[in-house]
């Protein structure tokens, strides 16, 4: 059974199909990757270095932005990746027109997910 | 006509059902207990739609409540309808009965106030429901072409296996159904956020692509308008424990279930009729029960629901088939799971092989095979609301 899966060649992360311990050696294509820290089953690790501010890519598309420099083999999750979507908490001036439009027709937010 | 098909119920309006329920519909929360008791008296053919709305609602919400209830009254999985009214509510019982009759189904109304209270209304409605059930039981299944199916695709309790195994398996089934002339419907607008470029590229015309982008933009701007971070709910805490980091990642995995090549034909409001072949996106929230309720309202006769962490959700009138790519969930929640596709992850099965099994399961369920959710009595129903109750 394979221990990790990289979905497309554009991806800079792989999904761990089993729990990976630090120090484990993995082969990804022609490259060797050393796991830097414990990766829980189902979580992601970097297969290329990702600089802070760069997109994290899975399924060939961006899934968010790195908030720290992420070395190869490191755990990639909410501590070092941030979504770029639906971020009302950022309060950026650029988002005010959308906010004002919605404020004109007050509505509740979508209910929480499952 | 393709040769693929199933044994279904051909209805007078030309639609095809995969179940044949006597539907007992409360117009309002106040008549829901009576409706439940009447449906239970004619179980298992009886199905109730208990809901918390029907009065104290502002215009748009009242419209959604009415349209959803009317859509269930006309649904092809329903053979006959009993409407349970209170008598002073906003939703109009006559309009619900009329929706059933327009679809060629017998329909009756019992009102609690004019009947003289709970006991008399329950007795009267039970008598009517028993007569309707007797007639409905004599309906025969006939061979129906697969092109008459509208498949609702849904995921819930997602984890890393959803995007790698169960959603791509379901997507292949959606592709095959559309190839055979059928339809698929995908909801949960918040869970397309981050994957909209892939779906928009499959839109058959630019106005459909524009409508998709507009509804996603509305959901996103609602979160922004509240000054909140959508990360508070998307991904959910369970999704994050399961390894999903952002809504974009969840969406990219989730959107697989609508197929890899199905053309995006239409974008419709909540519970609105699905009229096009190919893929339709419906404007539903991500909350599982509200989402399934809306897609069945739109006319989907069968739901395939992928899950990683496991979830029991069913529907009162449509079978909901559960598949998982998580081998542990397949064992730990075996009661709730119809199909285990975890072999895709350990290379013991290909995605196409898993899709073959799921396709066969869908047709068997449409011909009458009971799903886990049906066996367990899972009949969750919730109408989406946007505005406060007044």
Image: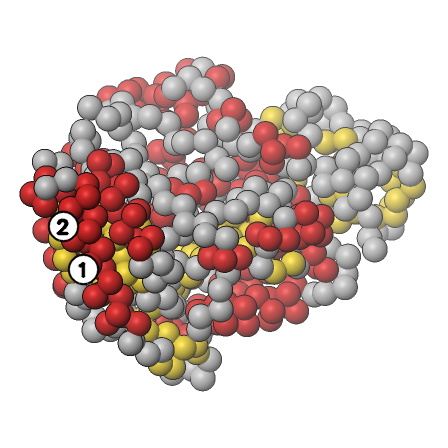
* Quarter of the rendering containing residue A26: top right
Residue at 88% across, 47% down: A27
**Above-or-below relation of B53 to B271:** above
Identify the disc placed on residue B128: 1
Q: Position of residue B266 (x, y in %)?
A: 33, 55
Q: Which residue is mark 2?
A: B110
Q: Of marks 2 and 1, which one's residue comes earlier in the chain?
A: 2
What crowding class fits label 1: few (fewer than 14 Cα within 10 Å), some (14-19), or many (20 or more)? some
Tag 2 and tag 1, C-beta contact below 8 Å: yes
Is B272 on the left-hand or right-hand side of B363? Answer: left
Q: Nearer the viewer, residue B142 or B37?
A: B37
Residue B300 visible? The answer is no
Q: Position of residue B169 (x, y in %)?
A: 59, 60
**Above-or-below relation of B358 to B258:** below
Q: CA distance from mark 2 to mark 1?
A: 9 Å
The chain carrying label 1 is B
Is A94 on the left-hand or right-hand side of B375? Answer: left
Residue B180 visible? The answer is yes
Name the colouring of the figure: secondary structure
């Amino acid at each position: 059974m394979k221990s990790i899966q990289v979905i497309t060649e554009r991806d800079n992360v792989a999904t761990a199909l089993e729990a990976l311990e630090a120090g484990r050696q993995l082969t990804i294509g022609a490259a060797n990757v050393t796991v830097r820290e414990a990766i829980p089953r189902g979580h992601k690790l970097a297969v290329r270095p990702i600089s802070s501010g760069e997109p994290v890519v899975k399924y060939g598309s961006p899934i968010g932005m790195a908030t720290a420099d992420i070395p190869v083999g490191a755990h990639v999750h909410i501590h070092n990746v941030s979504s770029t979507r639906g971020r009302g908490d950022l309060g950026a001036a650029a988002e005010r027109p959308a906010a004002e439009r919605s404020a004109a027709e007050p509505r509740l937010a979508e209910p929480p997910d499952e | 006509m393709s040769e693929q098909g199933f044994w279904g119920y051909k209805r007078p309006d030309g639609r095809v059902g995969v179940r044949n329920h006597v539907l007992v519909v409360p117009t309002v929360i106040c008549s829901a207990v009576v409706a439940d008791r009447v449906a239970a008296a004619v179980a298992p053919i009886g199905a109730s739609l208990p809901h918390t709305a029907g009065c104290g609602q502002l215009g748009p919400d009242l419209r959604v409540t009415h349209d959803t209830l009317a859509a269930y009254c006309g649904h092809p999985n329903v053979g006959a309808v009993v409407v349970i009214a209170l008598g002073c509510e906003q939703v109009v019982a006559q309009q619900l009965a009329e929706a059933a009759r327009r679809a060629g189904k017998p329909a009756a109304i019992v009102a609690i106030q004019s009947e003289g209270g709970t006991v008399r209304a329950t007795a009267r409605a039970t008598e009517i429901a028993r007569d309707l059930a007797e007639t409905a039981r004599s309906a025969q299944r006939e061979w129906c072409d697969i092109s008459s199916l509208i498949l609702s695709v849904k995921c819930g309790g997602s984890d890393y296996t959803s995007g790698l195994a169960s959603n791509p398996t379901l997507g292949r089934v959606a592709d095959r159904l559309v190839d055979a002339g059928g339809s698929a419907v995908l909801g949960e607008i918040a869970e397309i956020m981050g994957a909209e470029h892939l779906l928009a590229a499959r839109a058959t015309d630019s106005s459909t692509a524009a409508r998709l982008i507009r509804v996603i933009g509305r959901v996103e701007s609602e979160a922004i308008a509240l000054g909140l971070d959508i990360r508070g709910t998307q991904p959910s805490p369970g999704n994050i424990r399961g390894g999903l980091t952002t809504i974009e990642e969840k969406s990219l995995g989730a959107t697989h279930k609508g197929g890899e090549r199905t053309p995006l034909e239409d974008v419709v409001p909540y519970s609105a009729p699905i009229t096009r072949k190919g893929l339709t996106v419906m404007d539903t929230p991500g909350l599982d029960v509200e989402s399934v309720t809306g897609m069945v309202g739109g006319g989907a006769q069968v739901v395939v629901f992928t899950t990683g962490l496991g979830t029991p959700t069913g529907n009162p009138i449509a079978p909901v088939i559960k598949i998982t790519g998580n081998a542990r969930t397949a064992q730990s929640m075996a009661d709730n799971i119809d199909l285990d596709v975890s072999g895709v992850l350990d290379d013991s099965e290909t995605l196409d092989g898993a899709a073959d099994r799921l396709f066969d399961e869908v047709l068997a369920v449409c011909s009458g095979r009971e799903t886990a959710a049906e066996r367990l009595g899972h009949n969750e129903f919730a109408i989406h609301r946007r505005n406060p109750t007044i």
